Amino acid sequence: MLEKGSPTGEVAVLAKAQGFLKSEASVKAARGLSHFGEHSAGWFALGLIGAAVDKKRRKDWLVASVGVVGAHAASIAVKRVVRRPRPDHPSVEVLVGTPSKLSFPSSHATSTTAAAVLYSGLTGRNLVPALVPPMLASRLVLGVHYPTDVLAGAALGGLVGGLIRRKLKKNP
C-alpha cells in the first residue's frame, strides 16, 4: 500500500539512508552485490571453489556451502510467515527488481552473514566486517528493504552460520 505524505518511522530512516548513501557508484556496486547474492548463488559458488581448492577440508567447505543455502531458505520461510511488504513510498526509489514482494527479513543479508561467519572459520580470517556491512547497505541503497529487514537478516544469518560453524569445529 502506498503511503502518502512525509515519510515517518522506518520509511523516513530508509529515505534518509538512501539519500545519504546513493550515488552512481554505490548504485552500480549495490546492483552487483544484489545479483551476486541472489538466492545465495554467489556465496554458494564461492564455497564450492573453497571445496575444490582446499582438499583437506573439502567436506567442511561443502557443509558450509549448504549452510549458506540453508540460511537463505530459513529467511524465505520467515518471509512467508511474516509477510511484510517491501517499502512503497514516494520518498524511496526502488532501483532493482526483486523476486518477491516480501521484505522481512532480507535474504541477501541472511545468506551473506551466514557465508561470512562460516567462511571466516574456514579461512582463518574475520570476513564479517568486510562482507556484511556492504551487503546490508546495498539493500538500503536499492530501496528494497527497511533497516530492520537487513538487521534481522544479519541476525538470522549469524545464528545459522554460528550454529553450523560450531558443529564444524567439533568434527576433526
Image (spheres, helix red, strand yellow):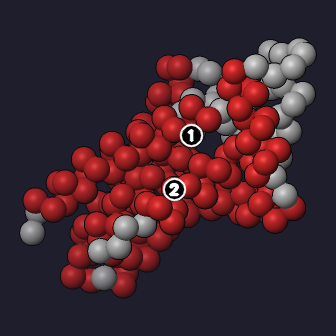
Quarter occupied by the C terminus: bottom left
In the drawing, does residue 117 fall left or right of residue 37? Answer: left
At 64% from the left and 28% from the top, the residue drawn is: 102
Judge whether residue 39 can be spotted in this image: no
Label 2: element kind: helix
Looking at the image, is mark 1 or mark 2 earlier in the sequence?
2
In the drawing, does residue 152 fall left or right of residue 85? Answer: left
Residue 103, by quadrant, is: top right
Q: Which residue is mark 1?
A: 150
**Residue 155, image x and y in percent?**
42, 40
Q: Which of the numbered marks, if any, corresponds to residue 132? A: 2
Q: Amino acid at mark 1?
A: Val
At 33% from the left and 51% from the top, the residue drawn is: 161
Q: Nearer the viewer, residue 161 or 40?
A: 161
**Residue 151, image x and y in percent?**
51, 38
At 84% from the left and 58% from the top, the residue drawn is: 23
Label 1: element kind: helix
Residue 106, by quadrant, is: top right
Residue 140, by quadrant, is: top right
**Residue 120, image x and y in percent?**
35, 67
Marks 1,2: beta carbons within 8 A: no
- Quote the CA–CA distance across marks 1 and 2: 10 Å
Quarter occupied by the N terminus: top right
Callout 2 crowding tier (Cα within 10 Å): few <14, some 14–19, many ≥20: many
Q: Amino acid at mark 2?
A: Val
Judge whether residue 78 can be spotted in this image: yes
Callout 1 crowding tier (Cα within 10 Å): few <14, some 14–19, many ≥20: many
At 83% from the left and 16% from the top, the residue drawn is: 3
